[in-house]
Amino acid sequence: MKVISIKIPEAMHQDMRRLEGINWSEEIRQAIEKKLRSDKMKKACKIQDHLRSKASGKWSGVKEIRKWRDSNMKNVNMKK
């Protein structure tokens, strides 16, 4: 694991010392992880929006599902 250092105001440090039983390293680690996950989600959304903007808009998921269901029903009825 890597070690990083941060500088905080003296007043904040005093407030942190008053709160006993808190693992500040873990609290900071979790805050960083949360920020990183949020950033990854934002990037993924941008990519998804970009891909969606390139699509023709003519494709319909509902119509595609209906087409496959109808074709499967025809196959089932033909086997009877």
Image: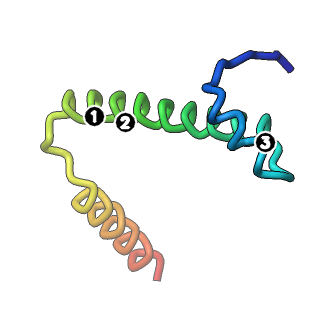
**What residue is pinned by disc 2?**
45
| Of the two numbered discs 3 and 1 in the rendering, the one whose residue sits closer to the viewer | 3
Q: Quadrant of residue 45?
A: top left
**C-alpha span from label 3 to label 2:** 40 Å
> Which one is in front, 15 or 55?
15
Q: For mark 3, what is the residue?
A: 17
Point out the image quarter for the N terminus: top right
Judge whether 54 appears above or below 26 on screen: above
Q: Which mark is residue 49?
A: 1
Label 1, label 2: how many angstroms apart (C-alpha)?
6 Å
Mark 3 to mark 1 CA distance (whole Å): 45 Å
Q: Nearer the viewer, mark 3 or mark 2?
A: 3
Percent position of residue 5, x then y: 73, 16
Inspect the image, locate mark 2, and give the three-letter code of the amino acid beneath it: Cys
- Between 32 and 9, the residue placed more toward the observer is 9
**Of helix, strand and loop, which one carries label 1?**
helix
